Amino acid sequence: MKEIGLLMSNKAEISKLTPLIEITLIIELLVEKVLQESEETKATVLSELSGYLSTSSTAEAVEAVDES
């Protein structure tokens, strides 16, 4: 937790950030995996992600994390 600048004394704040941290770690793992793929696969994945990120459900999910 220190590496991302969070104070250990503020456990309530840390617990609020846990879902965001988990999502960030998942995204990091997915990016590492995609970078190992062919250029065509990378392009396809980026295209799919771009479409997904533009949906309102994603925006709602981000807002929910921001509100917690």
Image (tube, grey):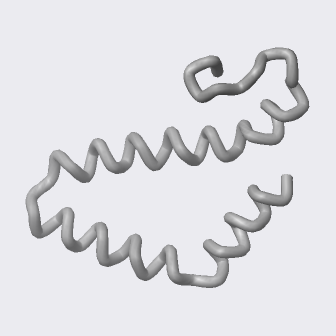
Residue 54 against residue 36 in the figure, above or below = below
Report the residue at 74% width, 40% height from top. 17
**In the rendering, at what x and y percent does residue 32 appear?**
29, 42
Report the residue at 66% width, 77% height from top. 57
User: Closer to the camera, 7 or 68?
Assistant: 7
Q: Which residue is outermost to the right? A: 12
**In the rendering, at what x and y percent does residue 18 appear?**
72, 37
User: Closer to the camera, 66 or 46?
Assistant: 66
Q: Quadrant of the N terminus?
A: top right
Is 53 situated left or right of 45 in this image? right
Report the residue at 29% width, 67% height from top. 45
Report the residue at 16% width, 46% height from top. 36
Is 46 situated left or right of 15 in this image? left
Residue 9 against residue 26 in the figure, above or below = above
Is 42 situated left or right of 27 in this image? left
**In the rendering, at what x and y percent does residue 23 appear?**
58, 47
Is 36 situated left or right of 34 in this image? left
Q: Which quadrant of the structure image shows residue 12?
A: top right
**In the rendering, at what x and y percent does residue 42 appear?**
20, 63
Q: Which quadrant of the structure image shows residue 66?
A: bottom right
Residue 36 against residue 53 in the figure, above or below = above
